[in-house]
Amino acid sequence: MWTIEAWNTIKCCFVENNRGSRVITTTRIEDTAKSCCSSFHGYVYRMEPLSDVDSRILFYRRIFHSEDACPEHLKCVSNEILKKCGGLPLAILTIGSILASHQEVGSTEIWEKIMHSLRFQLERSPAFEWLRHVFNLGYNDLSLELKTCMLYLGIFPEDHKIVKDDLLRRWIAEGFVTEKHGAIQEEIAESYFNELINRNLIQIAEFDDCGEVFSCRLHDILLDYIILKCTEENFITIIDGQHSTKGPLDVRRLSLRVYGNSESNDVVENMALTQARSFNFCGSTQWLPSLTKFRLLRVLNLDISLDIYYSMDSRRSYDMSCILSLFQLRYLRTNGTKNNEKLLTQLRKLEQLKTLEVVREYGNFVLEVQMLPSTLWHLILPDAVKLTSGISHLRNLRTLSEFEIKLHDVGRMKELGKLTNLRELKLFQRVYGVGDTSEVLLSSLCKLVNLRSIVVRRGRLKEDVLARWSPPPRHLRRLHVLECLFSTIPADWLTHLHNLSSLEILVRSLPSDGIVLLARLTLLVHLKLHVQDHVPQEGFVVFHHTAFPNLRELWFRWEAPCLAFEAGTMPRLQSLGIDCYAQGARDADGVLDGIQHLGSLVEFQVHVYERRGYISRMLLCGDLKRPRVEEQRRWDRTSLKAALKEAIRKHPGSLRVVIIDM
């Protein structure tokens, strides 16, 4: 079934007479599956890939007619072939049929030859005809925009985790996405991404802390199919030393992955690169072709091998100033800025640049903000790069990471408030302290009405300063502020953040209704709560039966692991983590009471801290005044861990338990 419309036509033939009849439909489109179920109270069964064990059984039975008959010398190469198949039964049977039909079925050389020629087999072998047909059905059903976006995935190497945000920025830079129906480009690009997931053409690899897709990957066989289509349409040219595609010399997009292979370099030298729109490079700079050849380049990703950072030979450093001649460049991601700081001071010449990302920087250097193009949407830098004043020059910024909070640089904090288009902001301090910038920072944050994510790491802001953020940032989905101490749960402010999905917060004391107040944030997926001092007088923290219906990950830090879980609480919680002190646990009675009620829990982690002798706790009093020392009786690690293990035994599931002494 390919469309909802088709199902709406077919279902008219079925009489709804409550006789218990059942109809099975198959589709690769999730929305279509849900539509088939909506009228008849049906159930969507998602076909998962075969497990490693079942894959081997199917594979060996097809070749040897027995699951136990595989010779020992073929098991290693068979595992590699099955990894390539990724649990796809049709692929396993197809490759198994090719091997079974071969006269020298027991030859390791034959197996390895077939494994390394799967892309060729997919293109030419009659045995793969049905698999090609299945892939063609899915591909031909895509719109022109989705076909283009899907083919672009061929630029990434096998088994690569493709970060969603990075992919969307590349699509936009390439010109695949245009604004329509009042939606901005990022929203349209994300809808394309979600549609590819909906059609099961890309696989989710990781979720982020907000419960959204963080990265994806391609099935290896599907990647081979995409690369074949890219070659047919001259969409991407791939050179990786092993599986280079052979298309026209007039290159539109180039993916070059070279490590000490001069033959690949010779191939590139003979290519016409003047029309290339995208260049993805991974390897040593000695194999990096001259970037002046890429006159119309829009997307440039340079993943430079680490050898240049450990070499004393200055010739190994690559002069990247030629990037300044790429006037169509919209996306630049590189880790090759060693000895090329001058490049970053002249990027203002690139008037089309939307994304600048510098990764894995080794060594500090200063970046003149005024020398960056005002067109930038996304500025992503490691904290080794020190930004000068003048950030207000970049009024179009939507992503800023990382931006330093300087203790006494009030002007710098004021400038931040002029970036009213910001959606994602990551802040940090090099020097631990409060200084006189907290109030100015608050004033600037109040002006950033479009913020979706704010992360503050390292340093310390003035106590309760963020509780006065007005109006509250109603669009905020991520708030990570463990470096900003709150005296208690800022309920009046926090509960206005109705869209909040991920929260990390530090409070001095947790009131008796603290968890109830936090539980008003019903969309929370991730919560990290650190309690510095006091908890309710009862000595334990209770999660009531309706708390956190969507929470999947909880980290709780307090001196004692005395948590109580009522039946019905956190029905989706999968990961529970606790940081605690052995001395703080007064007895074992309140340790993880009711953990058996967390029915979805699969992972439990504990970090146990113990200070020798008496515990000495640093309690911040106002603006970093002297610490107060409290003495508590010692309760050793062994007793605490025994109590934790005893509580865990009450859980009916098979938990993955990690207890670490810190």
Image (cartoon, rainbow, N blue to C red):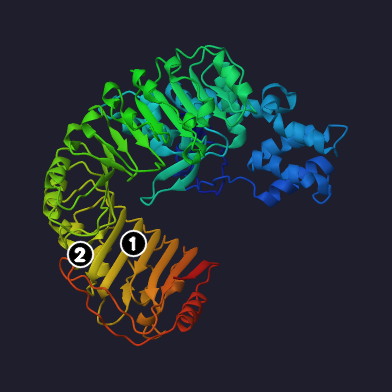
**First-in-chain label (1 vs 2):** 2
The reply, left or right, for residue 271 in relation to residue 498 is: right
Instruction: Decide which of 658, 55 is in the foreground and name it.
Output: 658
Q: Which residue type carries mark 2?
A: Phe
Q: Which residue type carries mark 1?
A: Lys
| Residue at position x 48%, y 70% in the image | 660
Q: Visible in this render: residue 36? A: no
Q: For residue 258, what is the image quadrant? A: top right
Q: Which mark is residue 486?
A: 2
Instruction: Decide which of 246, 304 is in the foreground and name it.
Output: 304
Question: Residue 479: x and y, percent?
Answer: 27, 53
Rendered view: 552 above or below 564: above
| Residue at position x 19%, y 48% in the image | 473
> Where is the C terminus found, in terms of image quarters?
bottom left
Instruction: Decide which of 268, 21 is in the foreground and name it.
Output: 268
Dots 1 and 2: beta carbons under 8 Å? no
